[in-house]
Amino acid sequence: MTMVLKQIKTLLEISQSREIMRRYFVVNGFDGALTMLGLIMGFYVSDYVELAIVITTCLAAALALGMSGISSAYISEAAERRRTLMELEKAMVTSLDESHHARAAIWIPWLVALVNGLAPLLFALIIISPLWLAHSGMVLALEPLLIAMLVALSIIFLLGVFLGRIGGTFWLWSGLQSLAVASATVGLIYLIA
Amino acid sequence: MSSVKRLVLDVLKPHQPNTLDFARAVASLGEDYQVDIHVLEVDEKTETVQVIIEGSNLDFELISSAIDENGASLHSIDEVSVAGK
């Protein structure tokens, strides 16, 4: 296990993929959270909808986001990594088949794809969790849809805070910026409804 | 049985791993390996470096495969220091 982690660390360093993965995590995580927020808001302002239908719809959307994230990131990253490897081989005037670079060209697209796909799926599942709890009979302090929306807004705020810390800007400001985007989305859905 | 005490290698390497990580990778091959690297030339995607390795008994095969594994290419062995039995 330690060897595998060490190997992954080496591949990430050689391919300089940490930043890309972090960006994918935030961008697609934000996508997932905002999509769930929009969906749940849509149900909230609609006439009565059964909780089971809300859960199924949100889960289907979360899975679709996950699959889309994995497949799109893998296809684009694999192509980019192959091209980078070919250019490096040309510059080195030798084959790099036995090197970390070749291994990175194979494995990094999978890692990036997993991060890109799992981030929205993970956030979506966290957001849906109050709906599951309510559906399984747990009594919640507020309406389950309202709690789910609050969870989504919290996640979006935290993603903003995370970005602020990376960028070295004031964490509260970047958190509030993200929250403003989410609030605008909620407002628009409310107006349409 | 002779033992290799010092090697000076001319190596072409990609920018990644950087010189420090490359030196660490070579130095980790033996307990008493000391590695010095001088960057001789930097191009767009590659750099030519002179790698000086010292130790009580250097394993050239191991060093050579570590160089390959890190995407680098051994151009020449410029100096060797070998001690007899």
Image (tube, coloured by chain):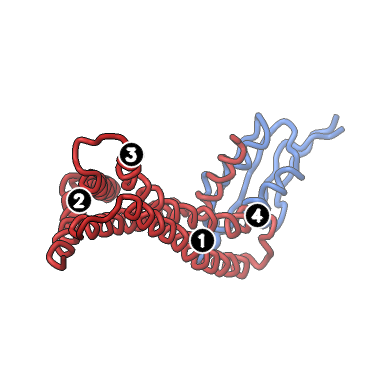
Chain colours: A red, B blue
Give the quarter of the figure containing the N terminus of chain A.
Answer: top right
Work out how far the residue at label 1 is from the one at label 2, CA to CA, in angstroms: 39 Å
| Residue carrying label 1 | B42
Which of labels 2 and 3 is toward the front?
3
Q: Chain of mark 3?
A: A
Question: CB under 8 Å between callouts 4 and 3?
Answer: no
Residue A27 position, x and y percent, is 34, 57
Which of labels 1 and 2 is toward the front?
2
- Dividing the picture into quadrants, the one containing residue A45 is bottom left
Horizontally, is B44 left or right of A61 in the view?
right
The numbered disc on residue A174 is: 2
Q: Residue at x 37, y 47 (%)?
A: A125
Mark closer to the chain start, 2 or 3: 3
Work out how far the residue at label 4 is from the one at label 1, CA to CA, in angstroms: 21 Å
Residue A80 position, x and y percent, is 51, 67
Work out how far the residue at label 2 is from the one at label 4, CA to CA, in angstroms: 40 Å
Question: CB under 8 Å between callouts 2 and 4?
Answer: no
- Dividing the picture into quadrants, the one containing residue A49 is bottom left
Work out how far the residue at label 3 is from the one at label 1, CA to CA, in angstroms: 60 Å
The local secondary structure at tag 3 comes to helix
Mark closer to the chain start, 4 or 3: 4
Label 3 crowd (10 A; few <14 / some 14-19 / many >=20): few
* Residue type at tag 1: Val
